[in-house]
Image (spheres, rainbow, N blue to C red):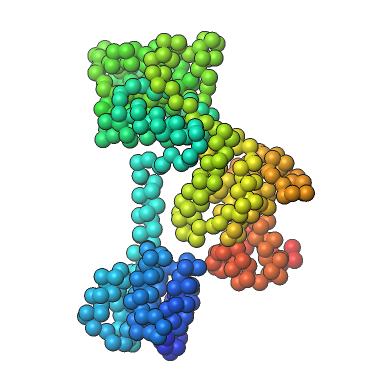
């Protein structure tokens, strides 16, 4: 349900607009002056604003200008009883979606409102899509290890030197590889990623080098491999330590000669590829155990970059947390939540076995399940189920509570999230004596959304 704010100093106009819009199932709030209107815009998420131009205390054009500074994507429809072409043009130049004269024509009003809401939705979707297809996220962090990585990338990227990136799962190895490509002379070419651990050993050679039609049973047509696809760009071999011995030999030859041969083919094909590899394994130990070729290791490790785990760079957690808060809240279309000092210390005290990936998931969970301010208690309550409760820093003089939930009952994170959300909503409803409006305001979601949650989880009073 779209939420609309009406700003007009004429009570009759506000009542008329409210009646029309509520009849069309819009959620409507109104205010009689621009100053209070701006305050409401800053505190709430509206999908549309209907704003009078001639008002006491603050002119509607000022409200439009200030409102778009607060919420750049918020559509404004300006309304006035003294409408002129010049006024409409000025409003349009300042960023208004449309201009309507008083008294408003019913059909024109509803069509304009619908179009403005559609445009607002499209702008949000476009922002999300742009973020999803954007080339590279920034490498966040100011710790010594991250600063050294950034410096190494700046030095190495412009060359064609092969790079081996090491580090634990979720620490950001892929991001380093993408920045090596982005800052290289090959940035206009493709970056092709191959997860060596996800491809069966019998298919890895076909995936990397391609195959000719009829070379094996399911080869019904010729296929171009990743080496050819990445020609002129970068080939990122993720989890290289899981590659089969036979594929290692062929990769070694491709690196030595810059030539490949498709599976089932005889023709040698020239490839111009920069190879960046990554692994979470200790390749020197894998060499000792006979699982990895030493000559391939030396070919790949012209430059070595080690990405530290999150527990080695805990001072970066506040910066990472703020970035994830802004990103995820923007995706969900909600105001950015704040993290208390105690909660931040609790986050820093957690054992981050999943590194950056785990931290992002944790922040998303806290955004969904916490109030406007994320507290230390929220971190304790919604901490990673795999982490012991005592790992979270307790307040002075208190012990960290043991978890009250048997996490083994959940098959996946979605089940756990639904369970936690149900219990949280139930707790808030009971705390507010099942006053749905007050509870919706308390947990900062729309009332209609809360009703949907109550129905979804089958919550009943006195259960």
Q: Determine whether 461 is above or below 8 in the image.
A: above
* Residue drawn at x 24%, y 17% as measured from the top left: 269
Q: Taking 187 as reference, is 387 left or right?
A: right
Q: Determine whether 218 is above or below 365 in the image.
A: above
Residue closer to the observer: 77 or 72: 72
Q: How many labels does the image show?
A: 0
Q: Determine whether 432 is above or below 384 in the image.
A: below
* Residue drawn at x 56%, y 69% as measured from the top left: 447
The quadrant of the picture occupied by the C terminus is bottom right
- Residue 345: give x, y in percent of width and height: 63, 46
Q: Taking 430 as reference, is 189 left or right?
A: left
- Examine the rendering and report whether any part of residue 263 can be seen: yes
Asked where in the image residue 69 lies, by quadrant, the reply is bottom left
Asked where in the image residue 192 lies, by quadrant, the reply is top left
Residue closer to the observer: 212 or 176: 176
- Residue 369: give x, y in percent of width and height: 60, 55
């Amino acid at each position: 349900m779209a939420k609309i704010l009406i700003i007009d100093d004429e009570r009759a106009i506000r009542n008329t607009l409210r009646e029309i819009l509520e009849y069309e199932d819009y959620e409507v709030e109104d205010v009689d002056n621009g100053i209070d209107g701006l305050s409401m815009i800053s505190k709430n998420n509206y999908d549309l604003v209907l704003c009078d131009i001639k008002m006491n205390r603050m002119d509607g054009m000022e409200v439009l200008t200030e409102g778009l500074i607060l919420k750049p994507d918020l559509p404004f429809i300006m309304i006035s009883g003294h409408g002129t072409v010049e006024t409409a043009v000025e409003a349009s130049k300042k960023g208004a979606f449309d201009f309507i004269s008083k008294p408003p024509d019913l059909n024109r009003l509803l069509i304009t409102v619908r179009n403005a809401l559609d445009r607002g939705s499209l702008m949000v979707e476009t922002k999300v899509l742009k973020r999803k297809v954007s080339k590279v996220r920034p490498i966040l962090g100011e710790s010594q290890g991250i600063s050294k990585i950034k410096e190494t990338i700046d030095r190495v990227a412009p060359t064609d030197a092969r790079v081996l990136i090491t580090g634990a799962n979720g620490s950001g190895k892929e991001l380093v590889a993408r920045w090596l490509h982005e800052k290289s002379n090959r940035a206009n070419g493709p970056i092709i990623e191959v997860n060596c651990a996800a491809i069966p050993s019998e298919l890895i050679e076909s995936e990397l080098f391609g195959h000719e039609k009829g070379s094996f049973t399911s080869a019904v047509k010729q296929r171009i491999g990743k080496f050819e696809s990445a020609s002129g760009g970068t080939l990122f071999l993720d989890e290289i330590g899981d590659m089969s011995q036979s594929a290692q030999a062929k990769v070694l030859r491709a690196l030595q000669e810059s030539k490949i041969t498709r599976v089932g083919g005889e023709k040698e094909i020239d490839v111009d590829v920069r190879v960046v590899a990554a692994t979470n394994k200790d390749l020197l130990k894998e060499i000792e155990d006979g699982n990895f070729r030493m000559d391939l290791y030396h070919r790949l490790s012209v430059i070595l970059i080690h990405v530290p785990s999150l527990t080695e760079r805990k001072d970066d957690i506040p910066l990472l947390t703020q970035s994830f808060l802004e990103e995820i809240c923007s995706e969900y279309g909600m105001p950015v939540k704040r993290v208390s000092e105690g909660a931040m210390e609790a986050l820093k005290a957690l054992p981050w076995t999943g590194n950056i990936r785990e931290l992002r998931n944790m922040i998303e969970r806290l955004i969904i399940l916490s109030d406007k301010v994320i507290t230390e208690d929220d971190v304790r309550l919604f901490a990673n189920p795999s982490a012991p409760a005592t790992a979270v820093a307790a307040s002075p003089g208190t012990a960290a509570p043991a978890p009250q939930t048997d996490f083994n009952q959940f098959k996946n994170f979605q089940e756990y999230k639904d369970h936690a959300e149900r219990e949280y909503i139930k707790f808030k409803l009971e705390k507010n004596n099942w006053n749905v409006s007050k509870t919706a305001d308390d947990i900062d979601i729309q009332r209609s959304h809360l009703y949907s949650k109550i129905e979804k989880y089958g919550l009943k009073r006195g259960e």
